[in-house]
Image: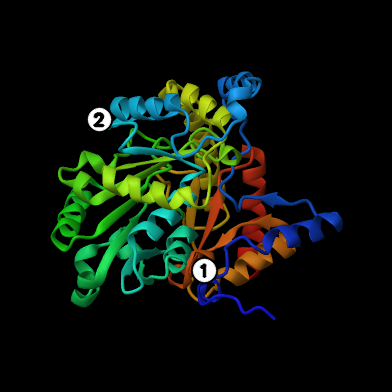
Amino acid sequence: MTKLSKRVADLPGYPMAEIPAIKRRLIQQGVDIIDVGAGDADFAPPEIAVEALARASRDPAMSRYAFQLGLPAFREAAARFLKRRFDLTVDPFTELHPLLGSKEGIAHLAMAVLDPSDLAIVPEPGYAVYHGGTILANATPHLVPLTPRTDFLLEMEELPADVARRAKLVYLNYPNNPTAAVAPRDYLERTVAFCRRHDILIVYDNPYSEITFDGYVAPSIFEIPGARDVAVEFHSLSKSFCMTGWRLAWAVGRADLIAAMARVKNYVDTGVFLAVQAAGAVVLDRAEELARGYVTRFQERRDAMVDALRTEGFEVEKPRATLYLWIPLPDGMASAAFQRRALEEVGVVTLPGTAFGAGAEGFFRIALTVATPRLVEAAQRLGKVLAAV
């Protein structure tokens, strides 16, 4: 029998791998399921995206290989968005690259820059690709817990000296999934300064930059002086524009790093469907207007769900960004056990903290991905589980 690679054996379990099968079984049993697990909102994508995709898909040229160049109009629209939104000027053909979702780009960048002797600093909790992508690059993940003590910020100055010396890359994600934490400017300034001193690449995962509330405006890492020397930033149309299944994103950064990532991608994909890129270009030229419409609805859901959860006895903060609530459990209550009871006993899909790494024990995540009445009902059901413990 073929023996699997050590890399595959070392991959941690994927957070949502078993949920679809359990959901299917319960639905077949007649259980009314409310799924607030995956960060995949039920809103329709922008109508202009659907119309642009339909038009472009009728053009035979759009069904040809995209290759890594992709559609120049998408690159240029992404560059215009970065200039309007962050006052960031980039060359759309050397400092920016289209991606099949930011997830693959993050993994492929790790393959481009990490060697077996290298450490990558991985936040825990964190998006699974940070840990998994490091392992697939045959490097070593160094897990750093994100805790309330530091407001869920990864403080580089607290790393052991030998870790800082060996580290080649750090994954940062603010606004954060799953904690919804945001990064103050002074935090970003000292992090950029630390990474410049230690020659550590910042992989800045920024897919929630447009989902912000109460006057908060999320920055780009490139608004920080010196960041262009040590960072690659990832943006996505998935969350802000409810286009998760379209798989369209981009990376931006130093030309040599973008070229290295593209070189890896040459061997594993031939680019995003050109018609999808055409639709993405139309969306990005109206990004701010379109995002505001979604944010208004996410904020209504956030406010209603926070109030409902507090009524049921949960201590939950009102986040300033993302489509998530990161909710602490009472001391001693295991998050996986709570999640399983919520699913099996009251039909609510959540994600336990441990789905994002062992360091996230004691929390669970809710995504604001169903209509407000269903969110409130989910909170009431979860309150029954809490009361029964």
Q: Look at the image and tell me in which quarter the N terminus lies.
A: bottom right
Circle 1 packing at 10 Å, graded few (<14), some (14-19), many (20+), is some
- Expressed as whole percent of the image width and height from the top left, the position of residue 359 reads 43, 71
Q: Nearer the viewer, residue 314 or 89?
A: 89
Dot 1 or dot 2, earlier in sequence:
2
Residues 50 and 75: in front is: 75
Residue 146 seen in the current view: no
Whether 8 is drawn above or below 20: the answer is below
The residue identified by callout 2 is 89
The CA span between labels 1 and 2 is 39 Å
Left or right: 264, with 90 as reference point: right
Which residue is drawn at the image coordinates 54% and 73% (left, top)? 333
Q: In which quarter of the image is the C terminus?
A: bottom right
Quadrant of the rendered image containing residue 90: top left
Residue type at the position of mark 1: Thr
- Does the rendering let one see residue 256? yes
Residue 63 placement, left or right of 284: right
Percent position (x, y) of residue 26? 80, 59
Q: Name the residue under label 1.
A: 354
Mark 2 is surrounded, within 10 Å at the Cα level, by few (under 14), some (14 to 19) or many (20 or more) other residues, namely some
Asked if the residues shown at circle 1 and circle 2 are in contact, with their CB atoms under 8 angstroms apart, the answer is no
Residue depicted at x 42% and y 21%? 285
Q: Which amino acid does label 2 sit on?
A: Thr
Residue 312: % across, % down? 58, 55
Mark number, residue 159: none
Residue 358, percent from left and from top: 47, 72
